[in-house]
Image (tube, rainbow, N blue to C red):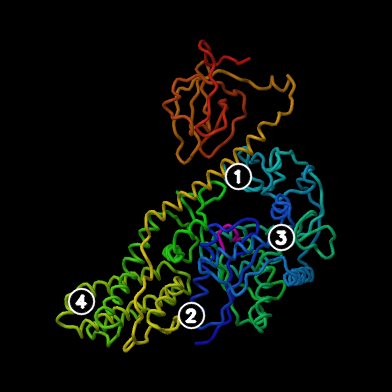
Amino acid sequence: MTKRNIVVTPALPYANAPLHIGHLLEHTQAHIWYNFQKRRGHNCKFICGSDSHGTPIMLAARKKNISEEEFIKKVREGHIQDLNNFGIYFDNFSSTHTETHKKYMYEFYEKIKEAGAVESRVIDQLYSEKEGMFLPDRYIKGTCPKCKAEDQNGDNCDNCGATYSPMDMINPRSAESGETLVVRQSEHIFFKLNQYKDFLSEWLPHHVGKETYNKVKEWFSEDLRDWDISRDNPYFGFEVPDKPGKYFYVWADAPIGYISATAEHCQSSGEDVNDFWRNPKAEIYHFIGKDIVNFHTLFWPAFLKSAGYNLPNRVFVHGFLNTNNAKMSKSKGTSLNVKSYIKHLDPSYIRYYFATKLSSKPNDIEFNFDDFTQRVNSDLVGKLINLGSRGAQMLHKNFAGQCSQVDSEAAPLIKEAIAASEKVAELYEACEYSKVTTIVRELTDKANQYFDSLEPWKLVKTEPKRVQEVLTTILTLFRIYVIYLSPILPKLSQDTAELFQEDDYQWSDFDKTLSGKTLKPYKHLMKRIDKKQVEAIQQENQTQTSHKKNETKKSKNSKSSEPPSEITIDDFLKIDLRVAEIIEAKEVEGADKLLQLTLNVGEENTKNVFAGIKSAFSPEDLQGKLVAMVYNLKPRKMKFGWSEGMVLAAGPGGKDLFILSPSEGAKPGQKIK
């Protein structure tokens, strides 16, 4: 087998916050693939680092009153510790804020200029006079220009799913301070992506999965847009050499970190980075989430092409990690805390669970503790680990841990297990981990059936030699299965090798004999998940979520306590407040907060209103209730239908919401004065 030079990378985690369980999904997926290639004997490098530039990091460091360098150093150390705790180690986990990285960033910039792929032009941007800076998309809130939903993000709408420029938003404001933003002009540097359209359309279908290609090719129905690769001062990053006061946009310099981190590793190992990034025979594999596909399948390949570097052999794309059918989110309190998990459970459990869900397709993965516990306890511990523990403990109890020849009648079982090696290897290569775990589970079932059918615990009294052979057979099969799962479960592989007094396994070790080997005394390789361990993690996660929500509520209350700006009587007279009667209220399918209200507004007229009051009221509570409503509010299209007004309520939110009701005697349709 030819030895391959391979670089494997997950996306660089952003250095502004601790890792969450979604990061672990991606890093585990990449680490399994790397681990498989290493055990096959290839020269494989596992490369990553902190994505260390950008406005969010600058602002986060300001809040802590420390330098950006100190801030990213602490975050990076925390990332490394968390990854190591889950058995994930890199050949180099670097940072994009290094001199090596700066050198490569400048090299790429010179190359794309030489290729005629750069131009400068003046654009309009949203500026915060309070902060003294242009705000990035994530720090802007406003009204969606498409559906008119309020309080939406600077680049996309949660309500209708539209994407847009912050400049197109209605009433854009700072997400931090609420300040109204102003428009200012600034010169920016653009990468002319359309220059690479023909190249990308040819390259894409051969280097991404079908689902990803079908999504990305939608961009090719028209010219590819120029990409703004610069940002204005103040900004934490590398200054553009020929543009004082301009800095490279974080997404322009982050992927180059794959090369600079490889270069740092090669410098310490005595290798040549060009053997991995410029040698046509070398291979590069990226593992990313589907939310950053455009950067890794459009901009990054175009950059590499212009600078004369190898292009990725494959970009593997995974889906979101969901809970309750929604993307895990720290801000929404639905994320699983990494530190809570590691405090209570073996990291091997979640590595195995992820593997049972992961394939080469970018499908979302639903995580719930019941399914997680069942798969680990039943499939991993109840079948595989139980097979090894029964065989090893009986061998020690009856034969001093000494292996013999295998049972001749079990030869087809062993032959079938060994014959699966090439299929399992193909599945690892294709990133089809769930199929690997299925094959091993099916093989393990057959081994357990063989073991149970012979009842060696009874047979040992009459046919001890046969039982020793049966136990040796069982342990031979167990050892093969562990080797097949070793890329997923490296700790189990090490512990099993120690039990058999062997070195940790390479892929080719599965067909070696155990005859004549003496096992060490058996120690538990894995234990079942206890319900109390899961409850402890859930409790800690809920506590942390409640704390964050309380902090958010305090922040909102503090903002709401500020006196509102004054209005004139003319402003007030524009609002038409009226009495309305709720003649029907019902839940809205797919909406967590909304109730759909049909309002009688007098003279046999009705209005349809979607109100975010579900947390405090059930539909039956509202039937026949008189309410105050904004009658002349401009109707807005929501994905559930048109909303034609607003019902007035008071309170901080949640269950503490109180609908404003007119006094007895008021009639539907009457104006409120």
Residue 5: which quarter of the image?
A: bottom right
Cα separation, mark 2 vs mark 1, equals 46 Å
Q: Considering the numbered disc 1 on the image, is that residue within a helix, a strand or a loop?
A: loop
Cα separation, mark 3 vs mark 1, equals 35 Å
Amino acid on which disc 4 is placed: Pro
Residue 88 drawn at (x, y percent): 53, 69
Q: Which residue is mark 4?
A: 456
- Which one is in front, 616 or 298? 616
Magenta portion: prevailing SS class: helix
Residue 17 drawn at (x, y percent): 62, 56
Cα separation, mark 4 vs mark 2, equals 34 Å
Q: Nearer the viewer, mark 4 or mark 2?
A: 4
Q: Which residue is mark 3?
A: 70
Q: Which residue is mark 2?
A: 39
Mark 2 or mark 1: name the one nearer the start of the chain. 2
Q: Considering the numbered disc 4 on the image, is that residue within a helix, a strand or a loop?
A: helix
Amino acid on which disc 3 is placed: Glu
The C terminus, quarter of image: top right
Residue 160 visible in the current orientation: no
In the image, the segment drawn in magenta is 288-293
Residue in the image at 48% along x and 75% along y:
429
Q: Considering the numbered disc 2 on the image, is that residue within a helix, a strand or a loop?
A: helix
Q: Are marks 4 and 2 in contact (CB under 8 Å)?
A: no
Q: Which residue is mark 1?
A: 157
Q: Residue extending furthest left? A: 462
Amino acid on which disc 1 is placed: Cys
How many residues crowd mark 3 within 10 Å: few (<14), some (14–19), many (20+)?
Answer: few
